[in-house]
Amino acid sequence: MSTKNPRVAVVGATGAVGREMLKVLEQRNFPASEVVPFSSARSAGTKVPYMDNELTVIELKEDSFEGFDIALFSAGGDTSEKFAPLAVKAGCVVIDNSNAWRMDPKIPLVVPEVNPEDLDWHPGIIANPNCSTIQLVVALKPIHDKAKIKRVVVSTYQAVSGSGQKAINELETQVSRLFNGKEVVSDVYPHQIAFNCLPQIDVFLENDYTKEEMKMVNETKKIMGDDSIKLTATTVRVPVFYGHSESVNVETTEKLSAIDCRNLLANFPGITIIDYPEKGHYPMAIDCAGEDDVFVGRIREDDTIDNGLNMWVVADNIRKGAALNTIQIAETLIERGLVRVV
Amino acid sequence: MSTKNPRVAVVGATGAVGREMLKVLEQRNFPASEVVPFSSARSAGTKVPYMDNELTVIELKEDSFEGFDIALFSAGGDTSEKFAPLAVKAGCVVIDNSNAWRMDPKIPLVVPEVNPEDLDWHPGIIANPNCSTIQLVVALKPIHDKAKIKRVVVSTYQAVSGSGQKAINELETQVSRLFNGKEVVSDVYPHQIAFNCLPQIDVFLENDYTKEEMKMVNETKKIMGDDSIKLTATTVRVPVFYGHSESVNVETTEKLSAIDCRNLLANFPGITIIDYPEKGHYPMAIDCAGEDDVFVGRIREDDTIDNGLNMWVVADNIRKGAALNTIQIAETLIERGLVRVV
């Protein structure tokens, strides 16, 4: 009478997010009958750690998805566009970490703490939001439910791991070279990231905002299911390895005191409050790295408007911002009976 | 018929800002008959470079100011509180870089591009504003004059040099130790600054804002001479050596397009516009280090409100944010005939 467990394909298994997905599947005891890592031909054959042994990464091909039930994608938009429909055809539910389907009105964009009900209308693909959006909407959701958000002004402090393993290496190399009096080479980023702040993440669009900034604007509205939420963003890369920080100014329709906001967030799933200014305790990137929750602190009223709040929101961009949220979506699908196991 | 040049005392000459003051006096050919560096007993005897030779730093005493015309202070609030009145008594004009007199209604708080006219009522002491405020008000002034500012939401990305030479050493040491697998010790800052963001600058006040945040709020109103300007700030220390960056959201009474704003700022003294998103050009901390101007870019309309703008403001916090602004005040005093040379 035992229920069969799903077979899980991890696409992009050698990347920073792919490796973290394997780690999260293991840590959370994800009920998989088997986990198989896939990658491009270039990385195929790589060994990746999983449970007590190593898995050999297999080259992704058009017929790779036969016999799988869940496919977790984190291999860039092009791979998702080409292979996700093939995975769906083969009977998989796809949870995609790329930008390919996020704003497609037929595809749900999900953060399980915020809009799990959107999973119910998935057509085979579910999109995982952008890292900077995920941690923001977790913090905004209870505020919106209680006091209706009118406007958000957000400035981000984003870690290099958001750009993958190459960017982690680039920051490391640049710092080493500078400390040895050598010239710095920038490859992943358009400018030196070591000991610098880059007010550009992703490419510039016609309105002079970056794609990352407009992702935050548009994805927030879609996940919260409310187009009336006004949001303006400035997204900035900082020389931090892991953990995105966000300075968030919120204007609500109803008054919400700092104390009420703190209590509200403390009781929301997936949020940990660190807010003891008198002790010098607040969320920091180095502390949240490797953690699952979204950490919120520096909650204080902004008296320049009637109903204003400032807060500081930090999360591990590779975990809650990517790998963990993807696996939480898979877990929620299973809970809701939305995965067909063959 | 030659006018006599003033004798200049530099108090706190061995600190990061004091050394930069000597450099700026030299670079700008400041018309001093003599420049004498002072410090506490602990640092007295140190040699500091000035012009083609070295000056020996003299211990600051109560009677040190006899025969001086201008005293530039950058030795902390306690030294300013004790010694600035003595310098005034001895006939000096004091330009003070500490927090001691900034919000005293009898003392002008001056950024020469913004409110030079406030020098006319100085009672002997002029306060130099906080670094993060100086670069902000330079960028805000032309906008306020043209379109009247209602509200500003600012998040800062502040360099460690703002906390002095010890903090520069701390970031350097922490990075080295981390790269050598050693534990990190934090002394200047309450937490590790290497590869981290600290949402705390200066101490916390009763309203849960930091002193640095409230400096930005209060000093901006005083310098701009307009208490109706509403400003809320989140100030953050980032692992950058030189150059503060600021993400600034502005709401004005009159409509100001991004293009008009760019032209307006480009024609304001002390501002350089770097705003070519299509080429990936915008202000960055590493580029502004050692430069005099306030650099503004990423100017774009914020359509979440009727009259909104976002911009990115960067300046060398040790130069325009401290030493340069102090010397510019001295120059403006001389131009306006407000220094009595004995």
Image: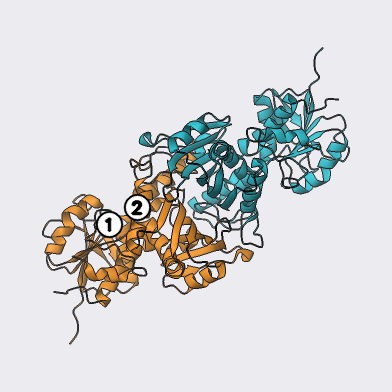
Chain colours: A orange, B cyan
Indicate the amino acid at tag 1.
Arg
In percent of the image, x 49 and y 66: which residue is there? A254
Query: Where on the picture, by quarter, is residue B223?
Result: top right
Subunit ID for the residue under disc 1: A
Residue for badge 1: A102
Which is more toward the observer, B122 or A34?
A: B122
Residue for badge 2: A215
In percent of the image, x 55 and y 40: which residue is there? B243
Q: Do the residues labelled 1 and 2 touch (CB within 8 Å)?
A: yes
Give left or right: position of B202 versus A229: right
Tags 1 and 2 both on a single chain: yes
What is the secondary structure assignment of the residue under circle 2? helix
- Please tell me how crowded label 2 is: few (under 14), some (14-19), or many (20+) other residues with Cα within 10 Å: many
Q: How many labels does the image show?
A: 2
Does residue A244 show up? no
Give left or right: position of A92 versus A132: left
Tell me residue B258's x, y (percent). Answer: 44, 38
